[in-house]
Every structure is written in C-alpha cells, then in structure tokens.
Image (spheres, grey):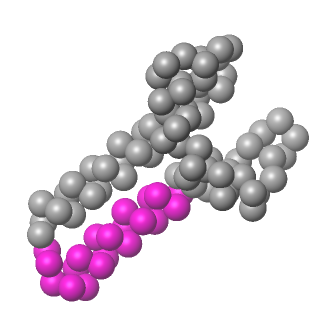
Amino acid sequence: MNTLLQILLYALTIYSYGLIIYILLSWFPNAKQSGFGQFLAKICEPYLEPFRRIIPPLGMIDISPIVAIFLLNFAQRGLVSLFQFLGLI
C-alpha cells in the first residue's frame, strides 16, 4: 500500500507542476495556442473551472489557480494522514 500512496502523491505533484506551467503560459503570447498549451488546457481547465466560478479575478489577477494548488497540497497531506490512520504505512 505504500507504493499506492507514493503513486498517488507523485500524480498529484505532477498535476500541481502542470498547473503551474499552465499558469505561466499565460505570460507568453500565443503559448496557450500551441499544442502543449492546448494539452495542458484540456487537463487543467476542468479542475480550475469551479475555482474560477467561486473566486472572481481581482482586476487582471486571477488568484483561483493559487487556491487550486493549495487544495492539491491539502489533498496530498490528507492522503498521507488517511493512510496513516488506516495503518497502511
């Protein structure tokens, strides 16, 4: 079960990095229209959509991705706590 936890944590970490890269693509013109940008949009937008509905942008700054990344971090910690609680690690 320790391997399962490591795989889940690794997947959440990679997804967090994908979100960060997707956010950084907005700083470069036409980067989101590239093949890589469209791939990240298909993966990241469904997760970011609920946060954007709840948290409005502050002028030109969208803080919803920051909240989304924090939630992923809490999910990682929650998984570790759950596995410890169940005695799987």
Q: Give the answer, above or below, for where 83 lies relative to 16.
A: below
Quadrant location of the C terminus?
Answer: bottom left
Chief secondary structure of the magenta portion: helix
Q: Give the answer, above or below, for where 72 lies relative to 18.
A: below
Residue 4 appears at what percent x and percent y? Answer: 17, 62
Residue 52 appears at what percent x and percent y? Answer: 72, 52
Residue at the spot x=87%, y=41% of the render?
A: 59
Q: Is residue 70 visible?
A: yes
Residue 25 appears at what percent x and percent y? Answer: 59, 25
Q: Is residue 21 visible?
A: no
Residue at the spot x=54%, y=27% of the render?
A: 38
59 to the left or right of 63: right
Q: How many marks?
A: 0
Q: Give the answer, above or below, for where 3 lies relative to 39.
A: below
- Pick the front one: 75 or 32: 32
- Pick the front one: 19 or 53: 53
Name the quadrant containing residue 27: top right
* Residue 83: in magenta span: yes
Name the quadrant containing residue 84: bottom left
Q: Which residues are magenta?
A: 70-89
Name the quadrant containing residue 24: top right
Q: Give the answer, above or below, for where 64 lies relative to 54.
A: above
Residue 75 appears at what percent x and percent y? Answer: 42, 65
Quadrant location of the N terminus?
Answer: bottom left
